[in-house]
Structure formats: C-alpha cells, structure tokens
Amino acid sequence: MSAADLDVYVESLRNFRLVRSYCIAQLLPYLEQAGLKVRLLDRPAGRDRAPVAFLHVDLTIVPPTYRGLGHLYDRTINGRALSIHRHLYSTLKLEAGDSHKGPVVVKTVLNSRGRPEQRWWQHRNGLTRSAHAIRKLFEPGYKDRLCPPYKVYQTIGEVPRDVWRNNRLMVEKFAFDTLDLPIVKHRYMFLLGAEVNMRQVYDDVLCAGSKILSNEVGGAVPPEVLAVRQRLNLDFGAIDYFIVDGKGVVVDANKTVGSNPEWLKKNRFRREFNDRMAEELIAFVRG
C-alpha cells in the first residue's frame, strides 16, 4: 500500500516551509479535507511511492535528481517541465551591437532574479549557511550581486558593458515604445484544466506587486501565450505577458506560483480560482 495518495516534490523541505505564499501550500488543505494523504519530499521516494506526483521544484532548471521522476509515477503534474530558462521563450532578447530605438530592460536569465537558487544553495548545509552569513556581513551588496534587481534603461546605449559579458544576465527590448505609466500586464494562471486570465494595471514599469492599481479577469489567452505553456510542458504555473500590436508577448514564466494573501482577500475571483484549482487537483489524484 502506498504511503500517500500524492507525492509533492520540492527542492528543499526547509525552503518550502519558509515561503508561505506558494499556491500549492494553499491547495494542500483541500486535499486533506477530501481525505487524501499528501507527502512532501525533497528526494526521490523508495518503493512506497504514491500513484501520482506533483513536481514543485522552485529552481529555474530542475536538477538531475528529479528529472526521472516523471517515469516513476503513473501520472505527474509538471513532470516534464524541466526548465523555465528565459532563453527558451523570450522573443525580446537583444545582443550586443543590436540596433534598437526604444527602452530596454536588464533581467537575470534565471527566474525571479535567481533568488530561489541562492536560497537553495544557502540552506544546503551548515557550511553554506555560515558562508552566506559571513559574506552578507562583510561584503556590501553581496545579495544584489548574487540576485541582481532588474533595471530599465531609456536606450540600449545606456546598458553597461559588463552586462553584455555576464551570462547570468540578459537584455530585452522593453515591450512598449515608451515608459509611460500606468502599464497593463496580463497573467495567465493554470492548473491542468483550471485557468484564469488576469488583466493587471501597475504604476511601475517593472510591475512590482506593491504598485498594482487593479486586478480583474481578462479576456481570452492569446495563442502566443498558450504556445509557451506547451513549449515549457507546464501543467501548473503562471505566464506573464503584454499585449503588443494585438499579440501576446511573454515576459515571464513560472512553475512554482505564489499568491499574495492580501490579493486573495481583495479579489473574490482569485479565491474562487483557488477552489477550481483544488477541484482539478483532487480529481487528478483520484484518477
């Protein structure tokens, strides 16, 4: 008999418990209420595997340890979603020497500024935790060097030379010709067949969550966005995009989505979407 009905794989049990805003953490109580047993794992299970698994590894590229899990289970969620590296989906990428008249943005090639990777490395063992604490104390700007914040420049000529030589960074065209505010960004969230497409308005060129002005249900998901979901093999996740000249231009893809608890309180449709995701997940586990 299986030890659980669903195995959820994370990169680190400690890190998973530190990040309280993960959507999956909000969904697991629904499964428990439905009488289903969930097991959190940060290493492959032995012979007592659950029938199905959910790969929730918060790293841009899934490490080799987890890559074969899709073949060990009858069914998986995100079992084939092995990388969300920006080079896999960016249509705005610029190279040194390119000609571009509009503003540009410098990003990390890793998801979320590479902070998940830094957090994973930091907490791997006592030595890495000590090394992190020492460097943070004695090296000014240490964390920003590891996880550089995104920056917007008015022209490509303003981008520092060392950015082009840094393979951890990439330069993209800013989606629009100007930096005028407010900016409308869209977010497509999904778990298997449960989907919601949001239209979000921001008073910030980088669309910081603290600068959101409104969040409402949007229209149909553009085919360009659906194509990125398919290319990245995402069963669960979120894709951020802009509408430019009538087409969806993807600027971010995530396979370990978080939800701000304050947003959930303010947006009834998001709470209802959590309910729909939970129903989809329960049906998946029950087969």
Image (tube, rainbow, N blue to C red):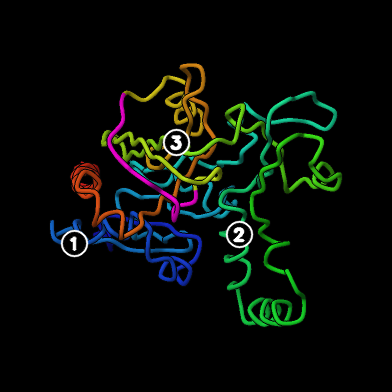
In what element is the residue under mark 2?
helix
What's the mark number on residue 185?
Answer: 3
Q: Quick one: label 1 or label 3, which is nearer the N terminus?
A: 1
In what element is the residue under mark 1?
helix
- Magenta segment, which residues? 208-219
Q: Amino acid at mark 2?
A: Glu
Q: Which residue is mark 2?
A: 117
Q: Residue at x 41, y 22 (%)?
A: 222
The image quarter containing residue 149 is: bottom right
Q: Residue at x 74, y 25 (%)?
A: 100
Figure check: 267 above or below 87: below
- Residue 58 is a magenta residue: no
> Residue 6 location in percent, x, y?
29, 55
Q: Residue furthest left?
A: 34
Q: Which residue is mark 1?
A: 32
Left-right relation of 70 to 167: left
Mark 1, other Cα within 10 Å: few <14 / some 14–19 / many ≥20: few
Give the camera-side residue of 4 and 284.
284
